[in-house]
Amino acid sequence: MELKFEIFKDEADKFRFRLVAPNGKVIEASEAYEAKTGCENGIESIKENAPKAKVVDLT
C-alpha cells in the first residue's frame, strides 16, 4: 500500500480529504470545502508546500 489522498463527502454534504498512510491510518484531515475543486486545490497545495514547511517545536 502507498500514501494516498482520499476525497469524500461529510455528513453536511461538504467535500473533504484525508491523507492516509500505508498502514491505513489517517495522518491528515482537511477542512470542509463547498466544491470538489476547492478540495482538489487543497491537496495540490499540500503536495507543493509541505516539503518547504518548517518544523516548530512548541514543547
Image (cartoon, rainbow, N blue to C red):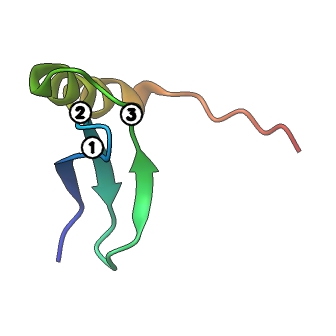
Residue under label 1, please give it.
17
The answer to whether residue 24 is left or right of residue 5 is right
Which quadrant holds residue 31?
top left
Q: Nearer the viewer, residue 19 or 34?
A: 34
Q: Nearer the viewer, residue 45 or 39?
A: 39
Amino acid type shown at disc 3:
Pro
Residue under label 3, please give it.
51
Residue 47 vertical position relative to residue 27 in the rendered view, above or below: above
Amino acid type shown at disc 2:
Ile
- Residue 59 percent across, percent down from the top left: 89, 45
Amino acid type shown at disc 1:
Phe
* Element on which disc 2 rests: helix
For mark 2, does the 10 Å Cα neighbourhood hold few (<14), some (14 to 19), or many (20 or more) residues? some
Q: Nearer the viewer, mark 3 or mark 1?
A: 1
* Element on which disc 3 rests: helix
Residue under label 2, please give it.
43
